[in-house]
Structures are given as structure tokens and as C-alpha cells.
Image: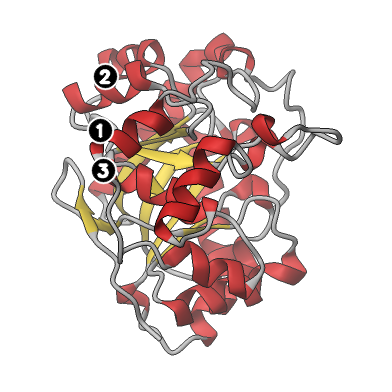
Amino acid sequence: MQGFNPTITLNNGVTMPAVGLGVYRSSPEDTGGAVKAALDAGYRMIDTAAAYRNETEVGEAIRESDVARDDIFIQTKLWISDYSYDSAMHGFERSMKKLGFDQLDLYLLHQPSPAEFDRTVGAYKAAEKLMADGRIRAIGVSNFSPAHIERLMEETDIVPAVNQVELHPFFTQKALIDFHKKHNILTQAWSPIGGVQRYWREDAKPEDDPLTHPAIAALAKKYGKSPAQIILRWHLVLGISIIPKSVNPIRILENFDIFDFALTAEDIASIDALDTGKRGGPDPEHSDRKAFPFVIED
């Protein structure tokens, strides 16, 4: 089955699907089935990362599918242990070997690593070279603040096409989105339905989770949709790319069935009002090799 999936044109003219499947926290054993279910449902974008340790399974599932490689937008990320120019070149080749493809659609730096920003710049310059050589179609960053991006732009030549960040109704990042719009950078949301609010909570109340918050529940009832579908539709209305994660084929299909209803301005405002200004994931200001000491093996 192939569903409708709008596309977004990046600042270098490359087009990408607005909705993709994320495989963060997907075990190698579950990743292949999730990717196949997503492609069957109509997804045409898959987001992985070296740090997720499932690039091999993503590549295998794509090759085993009935969908042509050219019809699938693949993005992965360089981990901070491979920052600096030479290390990034090696990290890229490692990822491509695991994926099993010659060209990548989008390559992101996974974290800003402010304490070692010279290494961050070196890694981004390697990505620029790889794009110039035709190995990558677009490059970008993940978890960067406006200050990080401005600093990067001062020392490199290509404005990031994408910044993938934590973004959900409880953490709307309006100032960052406005900065992205000013520089024609696409905002892509990881944890778009607030999964990060659930990963480490054991006794959460309904109002502590976007999926069970009364305001979202009311909209789900109004439209006959699930709370997740309401939240994902909210992202698309705001022009945000989304990569919801699931290994459940039913959930994967549900997360893609979001194009047959429209939220009103009042609905959007009611979701915007849930913003707490508090992130659920790690603070990128403290992201470095000391905070995340693991390395990616060849």
C-alpha cells in the first residue's frame, strides 16, 4: 500500500518526504521488520544514525523491499566520537558500508559538541566535501541551537539544510523554528509525539504525557483520530518534518494516516499552549565525548 506523503524542498533544491520512520531505540532484531512495514505503508524516508547501531538492518530491509532505492530518502548521522575532518570521512564510509549504498540523501552531525567545536567544524567540512563529490545530496545538523548554527556558519560554506531536534507539544522550540525560517533551514522533529517524555518515567500522570493530555485527547475525540495522529498533524501544519518511531506495524500505519483531516487555527493554538519550555532529552550544551564516551565500532 502506498499512501500520500507530501514533500519538502530543502535549501539546496533537494526534495524529501515530510514524514519518515525513525529507528531510534529500535533493536537490530526489530529494525528490519519496522522498515519493511513502513515502506509497505507508503513511507519513503528512513532516519537512522551510527549511534543507533542499526544501519545494517536498515540497508538490508530497503534492499529486500519492492521499493526502488531512488524512491527512498535515507538519512543517517555522524556520532561525536568521529568528529574532526579525517575521522568524519572514516565515519561516513563506515556508515555507507553498513547501509550498503553508494550515495546518501541526508547526512547530519548528531550533536554540536560545544566544548570541542573545532572538531565539530572539521566534521561538517568533511560533509561539505562529500556533498561536493556527489556522495551526499544534502547535509545538516541535529540538536544544534541558534548559537551553534551561527558559529558553524561563520566557519563553513554551506548553510545546513536540516536541523533535527527534540520537538513536541510540551517543547515547541518556537524561537528555534523562527531562526530556522530566517535561514531557510528545515526543522525536523525527533520524538514528535513526545516519546522522550515516556522513556524514563514510571509513574507519569495523564497531563505529563502529550499522548494522554486532556487537550490532545479532546481533539482526538473531535476528529475520530488517535492522540498521536493529532500531534503528528500539528507538526505538518507548522511545516515541520517528522520521523515518528515505532516497531509495531499497526502503529507505523497509524502514524502515516494523517492526511485526511485538518486542524483549525484554534486547535493549533490549544496544542501550542501546552509548551512547558522544558526538554525531555539531554541538553546539547553539555554534549561531548565526556558526556557520551561510547565510540562507533568498524
Q: Residue, x 50% and y 25% (percent of image)? A: 171
How packed mark 1 is, by other alpha carbons closer than 10 Å (few <14, some 14-19, many 20 or more), is some
Q: Nearer the viewer, mark 2 or mark 3?
A: 3
Give the amino acid at mark 3.
Thr
Q: Secondary structure at mark 2?
A: helix
Q: Does residue 118 sit above or below 158 in this rendering? A: above
Label 2, on which residue? 179
Instruction: Evaluate if marks 2 and 1 touch, with contact meaning CB atoms under 8 Å apart.
Output: yes
Q: Which mark is residue 185?
A: 1
Label 3, on which residue? 264
Give the x, y percent position of residue 253: 51, 72
The quarter of the rendered structure image containing the N terminus is bottom left
Q: Residue, x 60% and y 31% (percent of image)? A: 80
The answer to whether residue 216 shows anywhere in this view is yes
Q: Secondary structure at mark 3?
A: loop
Q: Does residue 80 sit above or below 250 in this rendering? A: above
- The quadrant holding residue 35 is bottom right
Q: Residue, x 23% and y 31% (percent of image)? A: 158
Give the amino acid at mark 1.
Ile
Give the amino acid at mark 2.
Phe
Q: As drawn, is 285 to the left or to the right of 15?
A: right
Give the x, y percent position of residue 79: 59, 37
